[in-house]
Every structure is written in structure tokens, then in C-alpha cells.
Image (tube, rainbow, N blue to C red):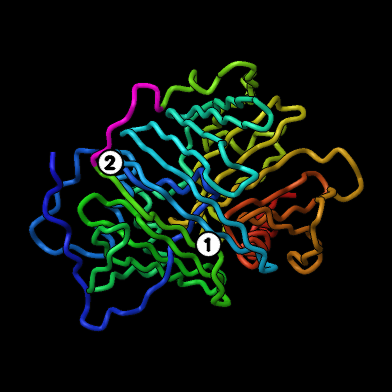
Amino acid sequence: MHPQRPIKPQVAKRAWISAAIPVLLPCFFLTAGSSVSIAAPSAPVSAEALYQQSLVSTQSVSYKGREFITQWNDDGRQIAYVTDVAHRAPDLFRIEYRAPRTMVGRVIIRSGAQEWTYIPEGKVVLHTAPPSAVRSKPTPGKLPLLKSNYNVSVSPLPERIADRKTFLVSVRPKDAAHDLLRLWIDPYTGLVLRREKFRPDGTLSVVSYFSEMDVHPTFSASAFSPDKLKGSGVRQMERRDPTSRLVPHANVAGALFGLAQAPPQIGKFKLQSAIMMGQEQGGTLHLRYSDGLNTLSLFESRRTSKGPTHVSGSTPVPINRNMVGRYVQRYSYGVLSWDDGRLNLTIVGDANEQMLTEFADQLCPLIRN
């Protein structure tokens, strides 16, 4: 089925301001989605409708293309990836690394909630099967939450990315601590063909783009088969915890023997899901919070030592005036950890230090004694 007429943005005459949309590590940069395209309405639509179309396309559009990703750490260090990405709607993905040299030949296959990662240097396939598929990306249902925290606009003039027409959708945070985001969306398919993310000080943290894109792909019978990763001498390792389980919101407060801290809202972020990883005695509670665009993970576990939790390579960060946390950056992800006397708490997210510290500052007064 051939694509319908593209969505034509509805913009104000002076809508020229641009911002950016966030990206995650390479295996989370997938935003496309079927050889069956999304029919575009005949009337002009808003920037929010074009953005929402890009969310729907994640499951509805099959494609394959080459993606270039560059990330800059807070200290200015740069790392670049080149991947061949393929998606067969609705839930099959394949990512094969072409760069950097240390990752050439690595292949990731995802089927629904399951994931297989082939690591050639170790001749091993890691199999991960989480207890339930929990989305880390915005979904159409989160659009009201997004609009309450961000201003979304669209450029009136199209740009060509990967030889396809796109429109720049800008997402500007209302909170100065949040990153500026923008993405270029193909109005025929809803695919995001370029992304940029800027820190609050205006410096780039991530750029990703497709140099080529095929929205009518053909795939071999084995393209998404994990069995094809298991060649001679390759061993498979299981990386899963069968005891992990989703926790209903109504029961979260009773987790960790009643010590769990799970406010329904922390600042602009609302609780989305909770997973207990491992047994109650020595397990970890994983809480996901979203502001409609960014997702922050809060990990809580019972404290077993009197000394502060050690975080390798971290630097001290003041929290809530009288506490000290430890902050470190891992690729594009920030990690902030601290102890409150009974719990070890860690926040992880594709976010800057200021955003994580603000989240911790707003959480601390909500912690029950």
C-alpha cells in the first residue's frame, strides 16, 4: 500500500522557534514504524497531531535504514555509533553495529519484550526476557502530560532528511532545568529521521539521523531469528530474574516491607509503573516516572550498611540542603545515588545533572518517616 498524502502542519505565521526531542542509548533510538502507512487527513493538523503520529508509527511502520548517532558527555568527550536498523511491524527489531570499531559485528534482535544481543568478541548471545514490556518512550496517551510541561511547535517549511520530506517539530520545556529537544518527522509515515538534544546551557548532547531510509523493505526469512546468532562455538547466557513482577500502584507503598517511597507525583513527573526485581528481602523496587517526554527510573533497595553507597567515578552533589548524593554520567545517562538512612536510592535517566538533582530535591520532602 502506497503512502497517502502527507500531513501538512498548521502553524502560526511567526512559528520559527525550534527545540529538540530526546534520545536514549543506540538500542532505544528506534522510533519508526509498516509498509501500511498512516493515512493523512485532508485538513491541516497541529504540531501535537504530527508528534502523536510519530508515536503511533513506532508499531505500525516497517522500515530499514542506516543511522548515525553522536553523543557528547558533560565533560565534552564524544562517542559515535553507526548502525543498520530494521523494523518489521509491529514488534520485531534488528540493530547491527558498523561503528565504533570495538562494537563492529554486535547484533541486537528484539521480539516484543524479549531481546538477544550477540557479542562477537566473547562469542556469546545474551538473552533478556523481562517480566512485562514496560514502555520507556512517550505514548499517545501521555500527550496531555507532555503539553502541560512542554510547548510543542512545528516549522512551516519542510526539510529533506534521507531524501524524504520532513517537518521540524520542536519541544521546548517550560522548566529551565530540562533539555531542549527537536525532531524531524516524515509526514507520510510518521518516522523520526533526525533528532537533536540540547542541554539547558545550549550545548549539544545527542544528534542522531538516518542517512538512508527504505519504507517498503523486504526482509530475509532469518533477519529477525535469534537462532541465526548462535553459530559454532557461540554460547547463550540468560540474563533474567523470574521473580521480577509488576506491582499494582495500590500496592507499591507496601513493597520492601513497607519502606518503599512511591509518591504518585514528584514535581512534574507522574508515576507510570513499578516492578519488584528479586525477592522482597534483598530485592530492588524499580519505579518509572514520566513528564510526558522524559522517563526517570527510581531504584530503591533496603540499606544494609551504615556507610554511604559507593558509586565508582562519581562526584558529590548536594541534595535537599542537608544531604549529599553521588552523580556520574554513563554515556548519555545520568546516575544520581544517595542514602536516606533506611533505603539506598538511585535515579537513572537520559537527563542532565540539574534535572536529576531537582527530582531528588522534590522527592526528599515526600519521603515518609
Residue 323 in view here: no
Whether residue 249 is in magenta: the answer is: no
Image-based side of 38 in relation to 292, left or right = left
Label disc, if present, on residue 61 of the rendered structure: 2
Which residue appears at 54% of the width and 76% of the height?
A: 202
Label disc, if present, on residue 154 of the rendered structure: none
Q: CA distance from mark 2 to mark 1?
A: 24 Å
- Which span is picked out in magenta? 216-223
Image-based side of 136 in relation to 259, left or right = left
Examine the rendered structure and indicate whether residue 122 appears above or below residue 44: above
Which residue appears at 74% of the width and 59% of the height?
A: 327
Q: Residue furthest left?
A: 42
Q: Residue furthest bottom?
A: 14
The residue pinned by badge 1 equals 206
Q: Position of residue 12 (x, y in %)?
A: 22, 78
Mark 2: amino acid: Val
Element type at mark 1: strand
Element type at mark 2: loop
Which residue appears at 78% of the width and 38% of the height?
A: 302
Examine the rendered structure and indicate whether residue 267 appears above or below residue 190: below
Residue 172 in view here: yes
Q: Which quadrant holds residue 158?
A: bottom left
Residue situated in front as seen by the camera: 110 or 345 = 110
Main SS category, magenta section: loop
Q: Position of residue 326 (x, y in %)?
A: 78, 58
Examine the rendered structure and indicate whether residue 308 appears above or below residue 278: below
Q: Earlier in the sequence, mark 2 or mark 1?
A: 2
Mark 1: amino acid: Val
- Crowding around mark 1 (Cα neighbors within 10 Å: few <14, some 14 to 19, many 20+) is many
Q: Residue furthest top?
A: 232
Q: Position of residue 77 (x, y in %)?
A: 67, 64
- Where's the N terminus, which quadrant? top left
